[in-house]
Image (cartoon, rainbow, N blue to C red):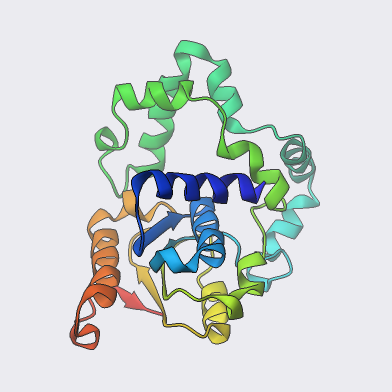
Amino acid sequence: TEAWFIDSLEEWRKAKNLSNFILLGHSFGGYVAAKYALKHPEHVQHLILVGTAGLSSESDTTYEWVTRFRATWRGTILSHLWESNFTPQKIIRGLGPWGPDLVRKYTAARFTNRYSPEGVFTEEESRLLSAAKASGELCLKYIFAFGAFNRALLNSASEWKVPTTFIYGAEDWMNYQGAQEAREQMKVPCEIIRVPQAGHFVFLENRDGFHSAVLYACRRFLSPNPDKEPFPEDLVSA
């Protein structure tokens, strides 16, 4: 399952004739990006992982609530749905013309406090999102345990050959402490940045902070004098 994504990315790289580039991935995309960099480090100059999966497990004390939730009847049902590869996107697609409206209502409720709901998705984007064929969602149960848990990246941290910047929203449910544990094992430069007033969707919830973090990460590895690059005042170094 992982090879399907990694090899597809490599074919895309060849088609675009890219080499020595900066690769950024978010959540599951961060997991794929890291796995790609592990297999093809010669092509990746710098890796930026945003709220990435692959650094935690249910045994971590931070996620004890997941174990407690799985013991409830709701948790049992959701766990069964996860193993059956039933995703919320299937419900959206099944609603036909009502799907885009539901997406707009969800994004408005999810991001109202921090981001203009009118700017999350346009009507056309909501329609495309609702109608899109299933893709990455179908692989989740094969790579992650219920709750998106997987320690594969943490277990391979000592093998990383690409300098890495981790970016997390300060309220991200993906705990940045997994990245701290990985950094202790990594033999390449690694930095962890937390963006205030943002959760897992940091690029929507605090756009300016996210852009600031990404640009800083890029400058650190493109500048001839990286140590002279000032750390942005609106961010937190972890």
Quadrant of the rendering where the C terminus is positioned = bottom left
In the rendered view, tell whether residue 176 sits above or below residue 92: below
Work out whether residue 26 or residue 87 is closer to the camera in this orientation and state it: 26
Seen in the image, is 50 located left or right of residue 40? left
Residue 130 position, x and y percent, is 46, 24
In the rendered view, tell whether residue 197 sits above or below residue 233: above
Residue 186 position, x and y percent, is 53, 82
- The residue at 42%/21% (across/down) is 100
Residue 76 position, x and y percent, is 79, 43
- The residue at 33%/48% (across/down) is 204
Residue 58 position, x and y percent, is 72, 63
Whether residue 115 is visible, yes or no, is yes
Q: Which corner quadrant of the image does residue 178 belong to? A: bottom right
Q: Residue furthest top?
A: 97
Whether residue 169 is visible, yes or no, is no
In the rendered view, tell whether residue 179 sits above or below residue 11: below
In the rendered view, tell whether residue 147 sits above or below residue 222: above
Work out whether residue 135 or residue 18 is closer to the camera in this orientation and state it: 18
- The residue at 76%/34% (across/down) is 84
- The residue at 45%/68% (across/down) is 42
Total count of labels: 0
Seen in the image, is 212 located left or right of residue 73? left
